[in-house]
Amino acid sequence: MNRLETHIGDITLKNPIIAAPAEHMIADGGLRAAIDAGAGAVVVKSTNESQAAKAQLRAAEYVALDTQWQPVAWGANADPSTMILSRSGLHPLGFEDWLAQCVAHDRIARDNDCLLVPSLILADLDRAIDMALAVQSAGLRVLEFNIGTPYGREAAKGAVSTETAADRVGALTRAMTEKLDIPVWVKLTGQSSDVPDLAASAADAGAQASIVAGRLLGMLPDLETMQPMLGTSGGFGGFWNLPLTCHWLALCRAALGPNDALIGINGITGGHDVARALLSGASAAGLASAVMLRGFDVISDSLSELDAYCHAKGVTVVDLIGRAADARKAFADMPELDNHWQSFVPPQSK
């Protein structure tokens, strides 16, 4: 048995590493590079019918930042702790050309035992359903329904959606799953006070997986210009987000139970982080910012690191799923430690 094999609903993946969508999955050769690097699944950059969402890509900007908030060089030699602040947009191709790209790369993916995942982002629901039916008719095997973009409140009206209400997530998911025969994975926002409620609503409405959770919005002032970097707010991603992702995954697993699949995303920079997401309840984990910043070798290196970890521990990926989440205790269940806190108080100046 392949110790890296995992399952998301009805779908089996050869490994749990998903090449998640960003601009490197638009560029010529990006999808093929991710497939060749060994990803278990690759997600095509999202599209919808909104011209404003496509225009947003033409105005996109990006900056890589170190842990002191200083801009640093982009590229393969960037430290894994490097973070990305960006304004992004949707795939520049029209829907028919985008779908043709999906179909062509699905053939390549099948030849490499990889799952090609087209992604639709919500603008108008009726148009999204029509596009989803076209995706299904084209023979594609799964759909990512992205209702968790970080940009909903900042983008032009109607361009994209950031859904934060559980009943709305349920209604949108049900509208999609009732029309489709292929599995639907729902991408949820992290800009919510209760991500597990969103995941539970998506699962109850027929989603085979919840993707937890979309990037947060942030704004960073530039101390030299005294203006916002990139001129406005942006999606913020990096290693720092991993504990938040693992927290939400664990709470979602507790709310949904072990049989509803979760996909972890954000803060995952390598194979050990994939293992941490699995231990927190994910069945697979997406890498986007790390690959966009440092290149497609991040995928193959992460696979090697994850495989070495599993080999050293004598476990499979399936053995890892939820182990830490299920061992997580409430604060009230933790033992008292007599005056332990005093060891962490800095000395007072004389």
Image: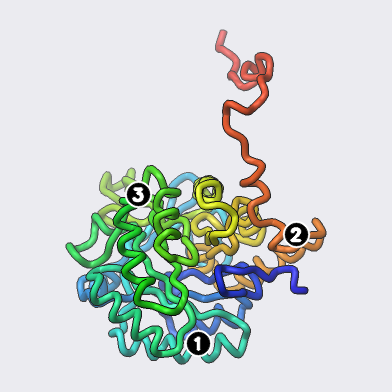
- Badge 1 is on which residue? 106
What's the amino acid at mark 1?
Asp
Q: Picture coordinates of residue 226 (x, y %)?
A: 27, 44
| Outermost residue toward the left in this view | 157
Check contact, mark 1 vs mark 3: CB within 8 A: no
Q: Note whether 140 is above or below 163 in the view shown.
A: below
Q: Secondary structure at mark 3?
A: strand
Q: Nearer the viewer, mark 1 or mark 2?
A: 1
Q: Identify the image quadrant of residue 160.
A: bottom left
Q: Position of residue 272 (x, y in %)?
A: 66, 57
Q: Amino acid at mark 2?
A: Tyr
Q: Which image quadrant for residue 315?
A: bottom right
Q: Tell me which amino acid carries mark 3.
A: Gly
| Label 3 crowd bin: few (<14), some (14–19), many (20+), radius 10 Å | some
- Quadrant of the image for the N terminus? bottom right
Residue 218's tag is 3
- Residue for badge 2: 309
Q: Residue at x 45, y 49 (%)?
A: 196
